[in-house]
Amino acid sequence: MTSLPLLRAACHGLPPLTARLEPWQASLLADAERLGRLVDAFGSPLNLHQADPFERNAGALLDVAEARGVELEILFARKANKALAYVERALVMGIGVDTASEAELTQALALGMPSDRLVSTAAVKSVELVRICVAASVPVVVDGADELDRVQAVASEMGKVARVIFRLSGFRVDGAELESRFGIHPADAPALAATIPVPASGKGGLRLEGLHFHLDGYAASHRIAGLGRSLLLADELRGKGHPIGSIDMGGGFPMRYLDDPWEWQAFRSALDEALLGRRPPITHGNAGMGRLAVDGQVAGELGLYPYYQEPVGPEWLAGILDAPSKPARGMSGGTLAQALRSRGLRLRCEPGRSLLDGCGITVARVEHRKRHRDGSWSIGLAMNRSQCATAKPDHAVDPILLRIQEPASRGAAPTPTSRAMPMPTSMAPMEGYLVGARCTESDLLSLRRLRFPHGVARGDLVVFPNTAGYLMHFVETRSHQFPLARNVVLSLGDPGTVTPDPIDDLV
Ligand SMILES: Cc1ncc(COP(=O)(O)O)c(C=O)c1O
């Protein structure tokens, strides 16, 4: 067993971005042989899941709401990770699931998730999807007049009442409206609601029972504006007889991947210095990831997730609920929590990434190393970029290198390095990039240049920390017909079990 600081020292960025790790992750990393056996058994890369942090993260949000007397319903945004382990845990915990596709919805229904704890927020809704929602009485979050029309048509065809929630956007913050491709403008919502007769007719009626928004970014002030405006609209629609029972504030609850704010600051400064040519590049091809040097200045927004930010999760939610709400007709202002409470409105939310904080790691095997003429190295992994990525340019935390002796059973001729035990002191330092199996120059597992002070050998394992939120599945492809990574769930305990997640038999 190797200590965590020693493990971390075997691979770091320039400068380092040291990943926050959960105790279960740290103890697994300290047992490289077990991890090696798991990769041998399930393939590389391998996604490892542990759902206890999910329960803790959700519980912390519920505590914040309960302390303020707010009824909070959490619907886990399943698009952030496809593993069924989290749906199962949500079911046990009594929280719900926000589904964004037909498959996400039908799988949750098949596991027994009650319709009251489900919602469909799919960005584009087929007739089939709407039929499933109406048949199962799952609320549909409606994004405009065409969608409302489609839900109405399906409800008539089925002779059922469809539950609908209006998605809103265009809230005013600092004198400007927040732009979005999604949502109905709050000023347009009353006219659309007026097309829905109240009370809902038993045959083919619609029941407008809630308001919803999901905003880009992580600004608490935007959610405060969204909640404030939604409260006013809820009053107005209730006045017209619509049974508005909840306001859903969507996801985007911030989290952090790093413990150290200074590391994040140092990385950003080093990136700018490199772009200005004042230090050697710290990224492949001196990629600015949104930053660009022009006339001796660096401009543009860094396109990465804010790997260090505060407040996060529960503190962030508390700040929103404690923010002052505008007084409405016949109601005193008070805080947003008081405004929700006094109206008997439930608060709903759809966190994805932040509920998965601490729930996963992705492990891949080193297959080759190649030294370039400039002295830098390519370290080839048995995985590709789609298996640890999001729409953002990079996952900016340092991977962890685990030294493993290459097993003879893999058929490799023994090389000086694969026999070079004891590791890690016997090898010279290496610097370079982790490269993936797709045939493009851009298939890098990280754009960040990494240093391996004790080298890297074939058969070693590279562990990407905290990948459960989006990084495992959001952009995963079967390009080149590579098999998808397997997903296995660890239970804690002594010795703990390893169970394949059933999702891999469904996709
Ligand atoms: C409608 C909706 N709800 C919730 C989420 C989850 O967001 P996050 O994972 O940032 O919490 C998303 C993400 O795209 C979304 O589109």
Image: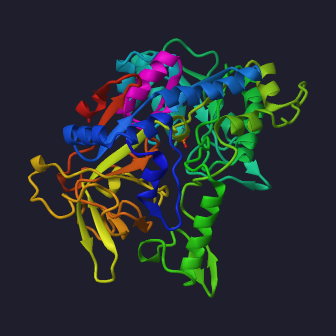
The residue depicted at 76 percent of the width and 32 percent of the height is: 321
Is residue 258 or residue 403 the one in the foreground? 403
Considering depth in this image, is 161 or 281 the residue closer to the camera?
281
Could you tell me if residue 385 is visible in this image? yes
Residue 261, x across and y down, in percent: 65, 55
Question: Foreground residue, 67 or 143?
Answer: 67
Judged from this view, the residue extending furthest toward the top is: 202
x then y, percent, for residue 343 = 78, 20
Q: For this view, does 448 lie left or right of residue 354? A: left
Say which quarter of the image contains residue 468: top left
Per the image, is 90 magenta?
yes
Query: Which residue does the image show at 53% across and 66% down from the upper left?
Result: 15
- Quadrant containing the N terminus in the rendered view: top left
Is the residue 77 above or below the residue 448 in the image? Answer: above
| Quarter of the figure that contains the C terminus | top left
* Residue span colored magenta: 77-105
In the image as oriented, which residue stretches furthest toward the bottom? 295
Q: Is residue 167 left or right of residue 88?
A: right
Vertical comparison of 120 with 454: above or below: above
Percent x, y of residue 96: 51, 23
Asked which quadrant contains residue 226, the reply is top right
